[in-house]
Amino acid sequence: MENCYDQTKTQPANAIFGVHVHPANDRYIERALAMTLYNLHTDGDHYRITKFVDGNVESSYLLSHNECECPAGSRPTCRHRQMLPSMLSQGIANTHWFWDRELESAVDINGDAKAAVDAVIEPIIAEQTVTQDTQPAKPWRRL
Ligand SMILES: [Zn+2]
């Protein structure tokens, strides 16, 4: 009988091994050598998007949904303005998370998917919330 759920075929290598390397494919190895990530921070009433290549800052631009100070800023849109809504919807602004534009997903500095971490952490947080709710409240004690 055919295995209809083979995870090695349905998930990218990075989702399983936490790296962007697939030994059978040179393209993935090239990608691992030059990992491009973006992070996002608020800066006044704008955002600052910073591009990292292999952990080194390559560029950093102020932007909003409508403007960007990058070389393509005069165009109707640019890659930064295109990424901004996705980055905000993933809640990665002002965090340690990065945006992988190729994967269109949030990752940590090693390229590990935020979704994989969330899948582990969220049940633990939910369990702790239930435990806290069922325990009697402890009185505040000022030191
Ligand atoms: Zn831009």
Image (cartoon, grey):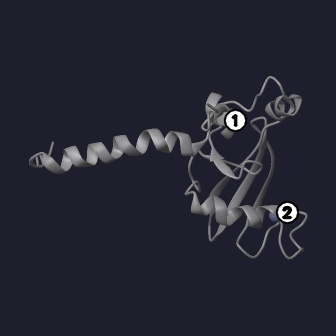
Rendering coords of residue 51 (x, y %): 77, 49
Residue 15 in picture, x, y percent from top left = 63, 36
- Position above or below: 59 against 70: above
Q: Label 2 is placed on what type of residue?
A: Cys
Viewer-nearest of labels 2 and 1? 1
Find out whether the residues at labels 2 and 1 contact each other: C-beta distance under 8 Å.
no
Residue 52: name its quadrant.
Answer: top right
Instruction: Locate the N terminus by quadrant.
Output: top right
Near-viewer residue (44 or 22) = 22
State the CA–CA distance, disc 2 to disc 1: 38 Å
Q: Which mark is residue 9?
A: 1
Residue pictured at 74% horizontal, 36% vertical: 55
**Of helix, strand and loop, which one carries label 1?**
helix
- Give the amino acid at mark 1: Lys
Q: Earlier in the sequence, mark 2 or mark 1?
A: 1
| Residue 130 relative to residue 13: left or right | left
Q: Picture coordinates of residue 48 (x, y %)? A: 70, 59
Which residue corresponds to mark 2? 70
Q: Which residue is drawn at 54% across and 40% down?
A: 116
Mark 2 CB lies closer than 8 A to ligand 1:
yes
Q: How many labels does the image show?
A: 2
